[in-house]
Image (tube, rainbow, N blue to C red):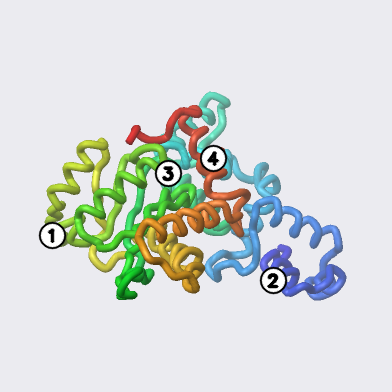
């Protein structure tokens, strides 16, 4: 068997194809075929150590094993795309896969193998983003750790302004607003402003376990702030606070806070503000620049992903409940 892992490793180290062929004792055609299929399946070096050469070979060249195996290989890219749609689960896709196999008189994999094979494919191709975040499912919210100084125009006394951050995890579309404190009134108003900015409220709200969101958040009981719960009821959304000291529960908000601290707070470090209104005008300008920055690993910008990827999954209709 050709050592596909080693071919990918040597190619990633910028060795010319002739040297790769000599090192692997194989033909130019073999090396070209491996690199072509790897690019087609979006597989890049480095790979995890637990991915064997045989498993990699089966993903790169599935046609080689069709005659040997009596089972129908699932369409993994299709499964991955469908999982991004609301309500679609691996169990539903398994039933559809089995039905198609039986209708054509072929043998499907059973549930355990079906799930294991898809997860192995997703692990190798690093295709995990769409599984984690479904469009329109949640809005994650948090306060930025850094503050912005605001000066009194008469006394030059300095006070701190705090940045509220909300994000749609699927498109990474961000909203930010400066407040003079982090108390309940500003917390509630910022949510309303975020809903207006996004065009509505999502199914879930995922805040931190701050006092304005919860009065108690333990392993056995979560008690929401009464005003916050009433806001959620008015907008028809549900509040699911992140667990204490579990930032991964709102990873999109954590990442967005870091971006806001860089592209808004740090970008405004040399400017002097004498009112909250003046600061929010500058924040709004920087926010538009941040949202319209092109992704490094995806095509387009956050608004483009929101309108071109998320909205079509809902038939082109408004993604959220109206604010």
| Residue ranking furthest to the front | 154
- Residue at image position (47%, 64%) is 264
Q: Nearer the viewer, residue 273 or 309?
A: 273
**Cα–Cα gap, marks 1 and 3:** 28 Å
Q: Nearer the viewer, residue 30 or 210?
A: 210
Report the quarter where the N terminus lies.
bottom right
Residue 215, percent across and down?
13, 58
Of marks 1 and 2, which one's residue comes earlier in the chain?
Answer: 2
Q: Is residue 113 left or right of residue 75?
A: left
Q: Residue at x 37, y 40 (%)?
A: 196
For the residue carrying disc 4, how many other residues have a C-alpha within 10 Å: few (<14), some (14-19), or many (20+)?
some
Which SS class for mark 1? Answer: strand
Could you tell me how far apart the alpha carbons at marks 1 and 2 are, in whole angstroms? Answer: 51 Å
Real-space Cα separation, disc 4 to disc 2, in angstroms: 33 Å
Q: Dot 2, how many residues are within 10 Å of its Cα: few (below 14), some (14-19), or many (20+)?
A: some
Instruction: Please tell me how many numbered marks the rendered image carries.
Output: 4
Identify the residue under disc 3. 134
- Which residue position is annotated with label 4? 309
Looking at the image, tell me whether mark 4 or mark 3 is earlier in sequence order: 3
Residue located beneath label 2 in the image: 9
Q: For the residues labelled 4 and 2, say whether their Cβ atoms are less than 8 Å apart.
A: no
């Amino acid at each position: 068997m050709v050592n596909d892992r080693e071919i990918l490793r040597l190619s990633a180290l910028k060795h010319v194809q002739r040297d790769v062929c000599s090192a692997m004792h194989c033909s130019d055609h073999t090396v070209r075929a491996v690199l072509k299929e790897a690019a087609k399946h979006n597989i890049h070096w480095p790979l995890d150590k637990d991915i064997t050469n045989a498993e990699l070979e089966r993903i790169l060249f599935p046609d080689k094993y069709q005659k040997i195996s009596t089972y129908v290989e699932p369409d993994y890219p299709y499964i991955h795309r469908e999982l991004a749609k609301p309500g679609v689960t691996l169990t539903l896709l398994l039933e559809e896969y089995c039905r198609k196999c039986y209708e054509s008189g072929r043998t499907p994999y059973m549930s355990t193998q079906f799930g294991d094979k898809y997860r192995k494919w997703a692990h190798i191709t690093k295709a995990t983003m769409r599984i984690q975040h479904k469009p329109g499912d949640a809005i994650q919210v948090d306060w930025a750790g850094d503050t912005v100084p605001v000066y009194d125009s008469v006394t030059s006394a300095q006070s701190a302004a705090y940045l509220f951050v909300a994000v749609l995890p699927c498109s990474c579309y961000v909203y930010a607003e400066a407040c003079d404190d982090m108390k309940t009134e500003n917390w509630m108003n910022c949510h309303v402003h975020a809903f207006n900015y996004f065009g509505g409220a999502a199914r879930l709200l995922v805040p931190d376990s701050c006092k304005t969101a919860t009065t108690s958040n333990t392993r056995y009981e979560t008690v929401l702030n009464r005003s916050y719960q009433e806001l959620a009821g008015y907008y028809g959304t549900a509040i699911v606070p992140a667990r204490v000291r579990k930032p991964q529960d709102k990873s999109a908000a954590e990442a967005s806070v870091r971006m806001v601290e860089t592209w808004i707070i740090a970008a405004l470090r040399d400017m002097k503000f004498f009112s909250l209104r003046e600061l929010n005008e500058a924040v709004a300008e920087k926010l538009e620049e941040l949202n319209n920055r092109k992704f490094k690993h995806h095509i387009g910008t956050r608004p483009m992903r929101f309108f071109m990827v998320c909205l079509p999954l809902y038939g082109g209709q408004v993604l959220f409940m109206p604010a």
